[in-house]
Amino acid sequence: MRGFLSADRIRMLVPAASLTVLLIAVFWLQPRAMSYTGLNLLFNLAVPIALATIAQMLIMMVNDLDLSIGTFVSFVACVTATFLQTDPVIGVLILAGCIGVYAGMGVIIHLRNLPSIVVTLGMSFVWGGLAVLILPSPGGTAPDWVRWLMTSRPPLVPMAIVASVLIAVVGHLIVMRSSFGVVLRGVGGNERSVARAGWSIVRARAAAYALAGLFAVLAGICLVGLTTSADANIATRYTLLAIAGVILGGGEFTGGRVSPIGAVIGALTLTLAGSFLSFLRISPDWQIGAQGAILILVLALRLLLNRREQAEQAK
Amino acid sequence: MNALRMVFSKPWIWAFIAAGGVFFVTVMFTGGASTIGLGQAALTFASFSVIVGLGQMFVITLGPGNVDLSIPATMTLAATLALKVMESQNGMIFVGLLVALGVGLGVGIANYALIKALRIPPIIATLSSSFIIQSTAIWSNRGLRIRPPQWMADLTTQSLFGVPNVALIALGITLVIFVLLEKSLYGRWVSAIGQNMRAARMAGVPVDGVRFATYVLCAVLASLAGFLLASFSGGAALNMGTEYLLTSIAVVVIGGTAVAGGFANVPGIWGASLFLFLVVSMLNTYGASAGVRMLLTGVIIIGVIIAASRRRVA
Amino acid sequence: MISGDETAVIAVDGAEKSFGAVRALDGVSFSVRPHECVGLVGHNGAGKSTLVNLITGGLAPDSGSVLVSGMAEGEKFSIAGARAHGVRCVFQELSLCPNLTVEENTRITHPALKGLGWRRRARALIAGKLDAIFPGHGIDCTRMIGDLSIAERQMVEIATAFSESDTRVRLVILDEPTSSLDAGLAAQLLGYVRKFVSEGGAVVIISHILGEILSTADRVVVMKDGRVVSERRAAEFTVETLVGAMGSVVRARDARAPSAAAGEIVLTRKAPAGSGGIDFVARRGELVGLAGLGGHGQTRMLVGLFNAGGGDWVSPKDPRIAFVAGDRHVDGNLPLWSILRNMTISLLPDLTRRGLVDTRAEAEIAARWRERIEVRTKDMANPILSLSGGNQQKVLFARALATRAPVVLMDDPMRGVDIGTKQEVYAMLREEAAKGRTFVWYSTEMDEICQCDRVYVFREGRIVAELAGAEVSEERILSASFAEAAA
């Protein structure tokens, strides 16, 4: 019995249960949502959020926090809707350069022992400024292939679900299964013992940041595929959503305890919360508030279960 | 000579020097024509950053992981509710002020309750509460076209001997906060907790009580800033607080307060607030676009923090 | 070089190491050969951990040398170097990543485990070792370390140290390896150690359970005050002679009757039910010592006593308990502040009028205490970190003594303090105790414990002996600190 409700399982169970409950509630309120198109509509916007959440999770994995994810995704969206569409080569170069900047951020934060919150805060101004320079007013066009990818209709299961599952699986393989991911998580768990075993912590942190940059770039591209055009503030709220998604999905701020599958589920839950409220005919005013309430609820639930687990272990 | 060296060893001096430099360059461009106007505008807009920045400063001084992300939402909600209560009547100003401060008090209590009860880092506690506060503000603000009472509008837009009234209010608050930080028992305790929370606890500092008071203080200052800003700009807007999330943290960092906690700096908040506003207006004067302004702001924040880290190593 | 039997795996020659005024190692020579298990014993501060740190490459000696066989001429010895030459150590602190599974931790310690199927290979490696050392262990290698019990973690830690991928393990240092294992598991481990040794390996074992040392080790090295004081074949020692070797010539203790002032009980803490420990009691005007090997629950009890005093939300009007930190970087110093502010933080509520601190009164009190404890500084406004370790510690003393608290808890606060200062502090404590103050004093130094009226000896997280008055002696404390056999 003791092995069944391990802290790890609780971390996985709570988010999955919250998503299921919410989904059942939505279907009950709006049976028409239980269709191919309905599901696609419900979860469409979750895809870029899920990618951004994975990016945030990678940073939190090494005990840091990225407050610039939202503006960075906006910037990438602007690049995608302009350069990537008109001059693909330059577009790709810019995006690759961004990933390099992320790796550099990891290096500087580590070497100078800087608080990641402040550095990424500064970066959010930088990305925001660059985005405004590229697209002073909303506009641009999504490249055809992105548009095609995001609006394709695979048989049986809608694109939004396929993409979410794909993101979760890829994230899981990289972070949880690969020998490389183990070292990155080890840095979050016990940096000293990882260093003692001969690993370079700077390199590990740079790798985690670069990977986060990659996922955030994908988030921006997907977002433009859905919205067809971009503007400089298109994804600013992703910063907070991504943090909330990681936490909802069972991740923690410190200690390298993260779960990519959970993070995707967290992102889906946050997206669904909005639809749920609109089906309840509660004014959209309360959408953000509901996300906050869910976050608090899940954290409370987790605390409760964790306590029970501890009591169980002490016996 | 010695006095000069002492002045230059103060961490806040750089923010003022930078602000002065930017002011000079801007005025040069216009041939001195806009000196007074620019000065007044800078003082006015800096005041709002100063008031929220002072609260955030105390929170950040509590040590790593302490930051209040609910400031923008609190500003909006306080302003909205206060305007509703006052209904543009001069006689209701005092009640409106009480409502605004009450919002701050409630938010502060809720924030620390979350931190303590759920044992979560302050950043996630204030983040989740800000979602709910923001929603409450949106809900109560819907279609709101209430103008502030005339007296309040006059008070916040006019000047006394050339100094904007808002700046005088902010200056008064700054003095109180300065005394609180430098002379009071509470200020000592905050600084002790920020340096080493465990050591502070073992030295008999009532850690929970002090942290609680700090989160309340921060929220109350944010609500006051919201109240004044709404009066100044002729009404409450839903996004009125948005820019203050980043600004409140930025002025604290640039102003010379230690990001890792334990050391706070009041004068620096003024220097940094003036500096941030003046950089924007300088770039405006020289015709730079909004993008360039933001870009430079970001570069400045990162530059300052890297420079500060170098100082610590040496 | 094939006949490795003659060459020591590791040879420390005339090593000296000082930390400030404290001489941790004073010319130690120590070597371990293959096919040999060496027991290392000594009381607190004998120099065991410093010696271990030298061998694992964590510290460099001030003078003398550390040689690992197979090391190239002029090669700089480091943690990585020691590992590469097959030296492993199981530390008392947890050195695994709690957020990773058992097999993932194996991957961290063995960088060679990568590529497809690494997980399977890691599991085979660690599970094989666990099976070899602890048959029937029942640990699932896919579980997270954080979810394992303390005993299971320690088993994994031990198995990790013995596991080998690309380099051969030649020397394993076991620092209190059985502290959380039950008797059955401990026996399995010791049996494996013998097997490992018989196959040509070398082991250094440190333990407070002397029976373990005598039954497992071939040779026992006894340390005291940074020196090797005795070194013989294990068979030539008994538990009694071993305890005797660790102690010094028994000094006559200043005949001191328990304070007459000792009156009503001011502090109590019941031993957890079923633990078999002794309840803790402190009376007014008493100097109560907490003895035993470091890390056996003394600090935990002090912190527990302090927290039970409350004061989390509001500073009490009359402070009841003051605390003198031992590990000053963790729970003592406020590193950004001046000496003055560090000294006065605890008594500020008494110096506050209408919320504002009376800085003049603060400076006066600080000046008085500076004179009383002789803090060596030109200016009390200098940063606390500008002081030497011993002087920082004095400031922390003044911080607690200057308050009105009737009870003062001391968490081994005199490490790194010179002998002159110590004498002054002892006198001050006596004086304060005579005025009715109670001191609860955890110390790892025998002469300090011998200053106390009454002593509780800790072992494995509980109080196992209470000594009062004339009973307080080095011998009694040593024999209570070390167990003959696992409990």
Image: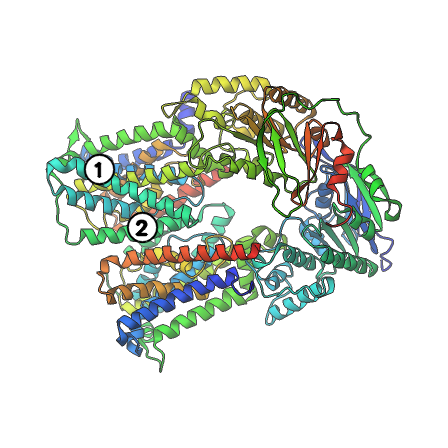
Q: Amino acid at mark 2?
A: Ser
Identify the element where label 2 is drawn.
Answer: helix
Q: Secondary structure at mark 1?
A: helix
The percent coordinates of residue A29 (x first, y second) are: 27, 70
Q: Which residue is mark 1?
A: B98
Q: State which tag comes first along the sequence, 1 or 2.
A: 1
Q: Assess disc 2: are there few (<14), some (14-19) or many (≥20) residues with their C-alpha within 10 Å of its C-alpha.
A: many
Residue A213 is at least partly visible in this image: no
Disc 2 marks which residue? B130
Quadrant where the N terminus of chain C is found in the figure: bottom right
Is residue A67 shown to the viewer in this render? Answer: yes
Residue type at mark 1: give it: Leu
Task: Depth check: give the residue in front, C403 or A204.
Answer: C403
Question: Which tag is nearer the camera, tag 1 or tag 2?
Answer: 1
Report the chain holding disc 1: B
For this orientation, the residue located farthest to the bottom is: A155
Residue C34 in picture, x, y percent from top left: 82, 55
Q: Residue at x 19, y 51 (%)?
A: B140
Q: For the residues marked 1 and 2, what is the alpha-carbon distance in whole angstroms?
A: 21 Å
